[in-house]
Amino acid sequence: MGSAALGSLVPVTLVLGALLVAALWMRRRLEQAGLGPGGHSVRLTTEHAVHVVTVEGRRWMIGTGPAGSPTLLAELPPEAVDG
């Protein structure tokens, strides 16, 4: 490998490393932020999970996995409020 190829490999490696760190940081922030009031997650396997997400009073069941983007599985009825 010539010095020109090595010279262009270093910046690419640095950019990919920075993207990895940013992705891990965002994942941690999102996990700490929660899924809204009444939201929760259930891991089905190491790669698959089902999440209940609440946004502006609407509740959705969303499935995630390695095959693609998150999928809306169902819209759930609003949670009953005690009182």
Image (spheres, rainbow, N blue to C red):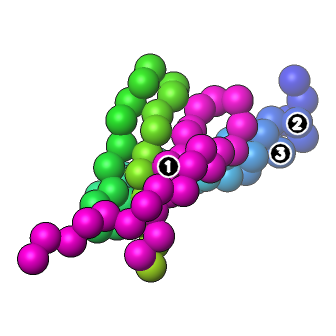
- Tell me where residue 34 appears, x and y as whole percent: 32, 60
Q: Is residue 30 magenta?
A: no
Task: Give the CA separation, mark 1 to mark 3.
Answer: 45 Å
Q: Is residue 4 left or right of residue 80?
A: right
Q: Is residue 60 left or right of residue 67?
A: left
Q: Is residue 76 above or below residue 20?
A: below
Q: Are marks 3 and 2 in contact (CB under 8 Å)?
A: yes
Identify the residue under disc 2.
Answer: 5
Q: Amino acid at mark 1?
A: Met
Q: Is residue 43 left or right of residue 60?
A: left
Crowding near the residue tagged with mark 2, few <14, some 14–19, many ≥20 C-alpha atoms within 10 Å: few
Q: Given the current orientation, which residue lies at the most extreme top position?
A: 45
Residue at x 72% of width, y 37% of height: 68
Which mark is nearer the camera, 1 or 3?
1
Q: Is residue 82 left or right of residue 61?
A: left
Q: Which residues are magenta?
A: 57-83
Task: Give the CA separation, mark 3 to mark 2.
Answer: 5 Å
Q: Is residue 61 above or below residue 5?
A: below
Find numbered disc 1 in the image and state the secondary structure of the residue it sits on: strand
Identify the residue under disc 3.
Answer: 8
Identify the residue under disc 1.
Answer: 61
Q: Is residue 73 magenta?
A: yes
Residue at x 38% of width, y 30% of height: 43
Residue 12 visible here: yes
